[in-house]
Amino acid sequence: RPRVLSGAQPSADSLHLGNYIGAVRNWVRMQDDNDAIYFIPDLHAMTVEHDPATLADRTRRTVAQYIAGGVDPDRCTLFVQSHVPEHAELAWVLNCITGFGEASRMTQFKDKTARYGVDAATVGLFAYPTLMAADILLYQAHRVPVGEDQRQHIELTRNLAQRFNTRFGETFVVPEGFIPPASAKIYDLANPTAKMSKSAASPAGLINLLDEPKVTAKKIRSAVTDNGTEIRFDREAKPGVSNLLAIHSSLSGRGVDELEQDYAGKMYGHLKVDVADLVTAFVVPFRERTTELLADPAELDAILARGAEKAREIAGRTLAAVYDRVGLLRPA
Ligand code: ATP
Ligand code: MG
């Protein structure tokens, strides 16, 4: 079975609608036909300033949300990145074959540096893409379901895998991104040309899955729409309306063409009410399930311990091969 791997950072208390539509939902769909490995990249959550008092809690909250969203620990491997030390170890090796210029071209680094300020740009943030490459390559993953924003990092991962294989001998599977166009990028409701992000500058357009459903519905009703009145999918001319149509389509399972026909002659307000209803129908049970799961942290920790054990078996094998190929002396 092909191997699939992905994760979402515990960089906030709640995942957002973009994480669900762009990532988690696809993980759930892929967990039966693939050997699926899903993890919580806590080491990545340290690449911008973080609060040590909340990281562990956010990590458990993120696991609970994966499971509430449909990730099933009995049908996949589910673990926390820092429980498998091989991630950081392989990242070092990859750092040593990554060009400084190559890493400097990563647009997420530039975006985050712009957002948090140059002083917040750490070597850790700079090296984020090589750690991500290690996450993927350690498990010999074939496919990596992610949002559009990760396309460039996947490309780098492929280049590093090929480079390593050429220089040191066939070692890594060269992975492919899995980025279904319809759900690949959900935009901020208040700023519909920017990606919805946990680290958005303002919460006005960010749909957190764990927010009060009323707050969420209000944000959707206040979504920035476009000039004119026509409900039509056109990313250039109508980014706000197109984003709402994309969200609608993802959650209702109906095609955008069909929705355009349905909304012919209707007003933006109608679309907003329907999107708010669809999102509410999803988040109400999602929040309940997350709360239930968080009530038993020992059970979550037990799930993660089992996952880490399975993950380490694979990761350990890959790292041993890598250390051997690059010529490190192994302990007797
Ligand atoms: P941060 O701002 O801390 O980087 P984030 O919102 O980008 O947080 P991540 O944890 O970095 O979330 O991403 C988890 C997964 O969700 C990745 O696969 C990413 O591509 C996907 N994703 C993130 N934002 C969106 C979005 N707006 N639309 C679709 N997919 C998204
Ligand atoms: Mg991100």
Image: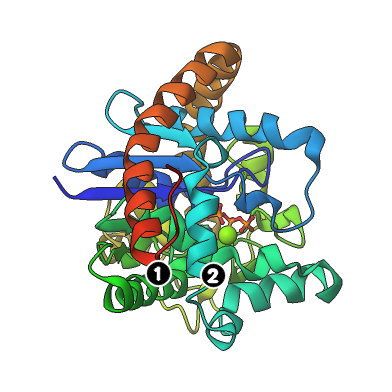
* Residue 231 visible within the image: no
Q: Amino acid at mark 1?
A: Thr
Residue sitting farthest toward the bottom: 101
Residue 252 image offset from top left, x and y in percent: 33, 46
> Where residue 97 sits in the image (x, y, percent)?
47, 76
The CA distance from mark 2 to mark 1 is: 11 Å
Q: Is 142 placed left or right of 69 in the picture?
A: left
Which secondary structure lies at badge 2?
Answer: helix
Q: Secondary structure at mark 1?
A: helix
The residue carrying mark 2 is 95
Viewed as shown, does residue 213 lie left or right of 237?
right
Q: Relative to 322, is 19 on the left or the right?
A: right
Residue type beneath disc 2: Asn
Q: Nearer the viewer, residue 221 or 331?
A: 331
Q: Give the residue at x 50% y 83%.
A: 237
Looking at the image, residue 169 sits to the left or right of residue 286; the answer is: left
Quadrant of image for the N terminus: top left
Q: How many marks?
A: 2
Residue nearest the observer in this picture, 136 or 297: 136
Asked if 264 appears above or below 70 in the picture, the reply is below
- Residue 254 pos. (x, y %): 27, 52
User: Where is ligand 2, by quadrant?
Assistant: bottom right
Residue 331 versus residue 177 in the image, above or below: above
Residue corresponding to mark 1: 157
